[in-house]
Image: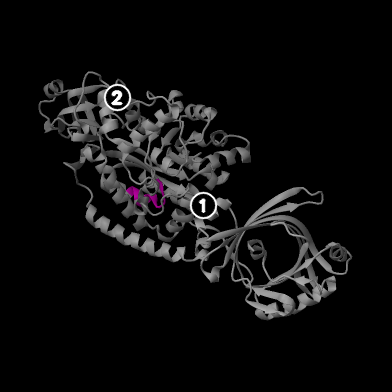
Amino acid sequence: MASKELILKNAVIITMDGSFNVYQDGAIVVQGSDIIAVGPREVIEKDHRDATVYDCGGKTLMPGLVNVHTHVPMNLLRGLEDDSRLDVWLLGYMMPVEREFVTPEFCRLGTKLACAELIRGGVTTFSDMYYYEDDVAEAAAESGLRAVCSESILKFPTPDADTYEDALAYTHDFLSKWQGHPRITAGVAPHAPYTCTVDILEACRDLALEFDAPLHIHIAETRQEAEQFRKDYGMPEVLWLKNLGLFEAKTLAAHCVHVDESEIINLQSVGAGVLHNPSSNLKLASGFAPIYDMRAKGVKVGIGTDGVASNNDLDMFEEMRLASFISKAVTNNPTALPAKETLLMGTQLGAEALHMGDIIGSLEAGKRADLILLDTHTIHNWPHFHRDSSTVYARILYATKASDVTDVMVDGEWIMRDREILTIDVDPLMKEAGIVAHEIDSFLVKREGSVLSKLLAIEGAEREESYEVQLKVRIDDPKPVIDFLGSGELDIVRTAHYLEYDAYFSFEEPEEARLRYREDEFVNADGEVFNVRYRLTLTGPAAEKEYPNSVLLSRSRFIAPATHSRRFYLEYFKPKSQVEVSKDRLRWLVKYQGLEFFINIDRMLQPEMDGRFLEIKSRTWSLKDAENKARLINDLMETLGVKDAEPVRQDYWSLAAS
């Protein structure tokens, strides 16, 4: 038996259909989950006399907004770390906190809070990318919203997967479970090309094709990312992904800030949806996506808020307004991205970007009944002009606020009436969120007080041998030592030539005295650099114990690959001071009385110093072994013929600082 028809009448209806029909005194007929008619009120009432009638009271009725890119569980991380660069924000704070706190329960709680915010702001469909997306989907389904939920897959461990193979297996089951759901569409989300391998991207593509599921991915969000791609692969990022076959799937391409004309043409030709996030891109200073050019070339562009950790809200009215203003400013053209087209991006074009334009995005017969009512009779939206038909779009885009949304319907069911959300009890959720925030605060306060904790949070640090024994002396002429080392008198394990560029970061706490950022350039016999290595070394106090002849015993704590820029570490660790040192280093690893020692001959380049420094050092886990090596270093100095050389008790950083 067919469900009873419902007429919503006495409304200004903005359809956003192909003809941009607007009915000043309109009505719409809903039956079950579908719209079956839209038009002038008198025509609708005449043709549907037996329907239940709902009087909209002169409000504006329009399609529900489509938020094309979110990370809704991150509603629990709103305001966690603001005014930082994207890499520091993401790698230094978001990911470490996520590894510690993100669970299925965390994702359900964050999603429910986000859904309440989305409903209040007139969003009826959102597209998400996060972890534990099965739980995100469950919470979204309970809220009554329509959602595209895509499971994140990365090359390194995530909160819900120890390996990317685990993530792929989870995603396969997730896609299977949600097939055919009336409001939830399950998708696959390889996070970004720089956080995935080729194998992961290809596996995600194949999985999306197998289930005819959307593939949600970040592309060209930062200039650094785009430039690195050209450097590594000799081509733009979009072209590289196209050659990989990624766009064979129904691709949702988030950000696309730094794409050129050829990439825009490629995005259009493969039918990818571009997910534009103006607030997030502004706040993280990622840049201005060329949306005007994309639209001129027919790219399907939708608008998203991104997660609230980088926005900091889910307000699509604000997002649409910013999208229009930015485009006007960037092109120096006030006619660029006018209100009608921008509102289209927030509704029908957004639906098309999600590859859902056949069922949502506009108010027309045959589509799902996803709609909202707006009270535009407010002081900030008054008076209304009618001489130009486009003013109705300008009224929505430039003056209407999220708080003006009064009613929301999804799939023919009311989920908010008269500003009361019917599917979510918000107050207890806010209380739970406050408890989570307190726990995260405590975690970060403890971590921020320890340089080691901050290092372990972002890099794969390994503990070095507990003790480093070293002796440094000044020598005027290194040739006699070099000749001796080449004579065969000592057992030489290997030799190397480096140019070393160090930045020493100092902190308040004495037990964590210095963090060294080092760039090693490996130099061949012809004096050419053939390899570069970046490392971090966290060391304790310089001199824990001193032996005769100024042999120093210090504690070398942790070493890690430096996978980010020096600028990143400055902004992340926030040192009290820094000292720069660079040197030309000749190194030998030798065996002396059966034990290994490093011999370095260093020429200081910055600050420039006369002569050379000769260092002998060794590392060990044993204090007893360290004391034995301290004695042997003196013997080795005598063997090298520099026993009477001037000892230097300072490390290079303190020499440079003084």
Residues at marks 2 and 1, CA–CA distance in whole angstroms: 43 Å
Point out the stretch of residues depicted in magenta.
129-137
In the rendered image, residue 570, in percent from the top left (x then y), is placed at 54, 55
Q: Is residue 91 left or right of residue 13?
A: right
Amino acid type indicated by mark 2: Asp
Q: Nearer the viewer, residue 277 or 11?
A: 277
Q: Is residue 640 left or right of residue 375?
A: right
| Secondary structure found at label 2 | loop
Numbered badge on residue 165: 1
User: Label 2 crowding class (10 Å Cα cut-off): few <14, some 14-19, many 20+?
Assistant: some
Residue 33 sits above or below residue 654 on the image? above
In the rendered image, residue 105, in percent from the top left (x then y), is placed at 34, 58
In the rendered image, residue 133, in percent from the top left (x then y), is placed at 39, 49
Q: Residue at x 46, y 54 (%)?
A: 95
Instruction: Determine if the magenta segment contains residue 134.
Output: yes
Q: Nearer the viewer, residue 263 or 36?
A: 263
Residue 25 sits above or below residue 85 on the image? above
